[in-house]
Image (cartoon, rainbow, N blue to C red):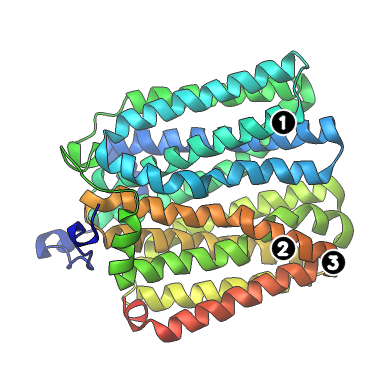
Amino acid sequence: MAKDRVPPVTVLPPAPATEEAEAPLAMIELLRRFSDFRYLWLGTIFTQAGQWILNVSLGWLMLVLTDSPFWVGLVGFFGGVPMLLVAVPAGVILDRYDRRKILIWCQVGLALIGVMLSALAILNIAQPWHLLVGAFLNGGGMALNNAARQTMVPGMVSRINLASAIALNTAGQNASRIVGPSIAGVIIGFVGVGGAFVFQAFMLGIALFLTFSLAITPAASKAAPVIRGGLLDGFRYVRQSPVLMDLTLLAAIPMLFVFPYLQLLPVFARDILNTGPSGMGILMAVSGVGAVTGGLLSAPAAKLRRKGMFLLLTTIAYGVVVVTFAYSERVVLSGAMIFTGSLVGSAYMSLNNTLLHLNVTDDVRGRVTGVYMITFGLMPLGGLPMGLAAEIWGAPFAVAAGAVISSILTTILAVRSKRLRAL
């Protein structure tokens, strides 16, 4: 598609006075009033909980098969990289075709992957390469699934309630980080990893049923009857809008340099805090609780007048909190810092996501979301150099260095971007 055929994307004007005068609904009321959003939200929770069960099960089975931490990390890498490859084509697809049908086929495909992995595990014929392929295919399906769910939310609620809807979505996804690993551990302990894969497929079946229950409007299901555009259009739209470009950069910086520290929690639990596997589980649960809290707090933050400045300061503070965690040798302080870090990180990501959707029109929402979703694929890429640095100089230095780099780059962005500061 020629470059001159791509219309520029500009910051959307304020909503009409009649809409802005409307008071935003409470979160519980939002779920009651908008039934389609309620079904989508519940489906997201079941899908994400199933995804965490799959991740834990894949890692456990890979450890049993290879007795190698490297292979365990590799299966996580294979699961995360597809986000980089699929996100942009997914955005084009979501702008051209019915988003509800795409979501249905995603759920079917993900469930089939779970069934195949469960068969390999139950029959005791799984090989490491099977798990890598399964993780890669699942990662691609989840990339399309997550993008579809994000693009459908703005068409299901009124604009004044969008911040609360995204906050609820974020809180639901992070709540699954608490429930999913716990369920996986219990099932693996009682019936084995094959049973965990079966249960994951069952949860995806529930999400599929909820997706079939949607009776959504054309705005949520499809941007327009006919959408033309090329694979790179999302990049062009983002590049032509300074606000969208800066919001995307602000999402990418911590995702690349800070968020990978969560992959090193086993190292901190075993070698620094001396708490063992049980301590690691507690740290993961504390992280999940903090992330849920941060997601819920992002809705009130969206009412602030200087949202952009608040977002920038929050992102800088995130790096400071993670540096404190990195050098803590006390369990209580480490738990407090990981709770605070997850709270701040979740709040900043949710608010960033809200501002992105408020500043883009629906005819290009899928393609812009596809570009934005690439940032989520940066976490496994950032995990590789952070893991290597931890191997050479130790985990505290590796984590702290990434957090400092993130805060410095965010400060530079804050100084450079007047638009973002005034957003």
Picture coordinates of residue 130 (x, y %)?
69, 27
Q: CA distance from mark 2 to mark 1?
A: 25 Å
Label 2's element?
helix
Tell me where residue 344 sits by quadrant: bottom right
Judging by the rendered image, the residue that carries numbered circle 1 is: 129
Q: Earlier in the sequence, mark 2 or mark 1?
A: 1
Give the residue displayed 32% in from the left and 28% down from the top: 101
Amino acid at dot 3: Ile
Residue pointed to by mark 2: 386
As drawn, 388 above or below 412: above
Amino acid type of the residue that numbered disc 1 sits on in the rendered structure: Trp
In the image: residue 73, left or right of residue 304: right
Q: Above or below — where is 9 with respect to 173?
A: below
Q: Position of residue 182 (x, y in %)?
A: 68, 37
The residue that label 3 is drawn on is 392
| Direction from residue 336 to residue 298 in the image, left or right | left
Say which residue appears at 36% left-offset and 33% top-offset.
39
- Looking at marks 2 and 3 on the same chain, the residue that comes earlier in the sequence is marked by 2
Residue at 73% across, 29% down: 186
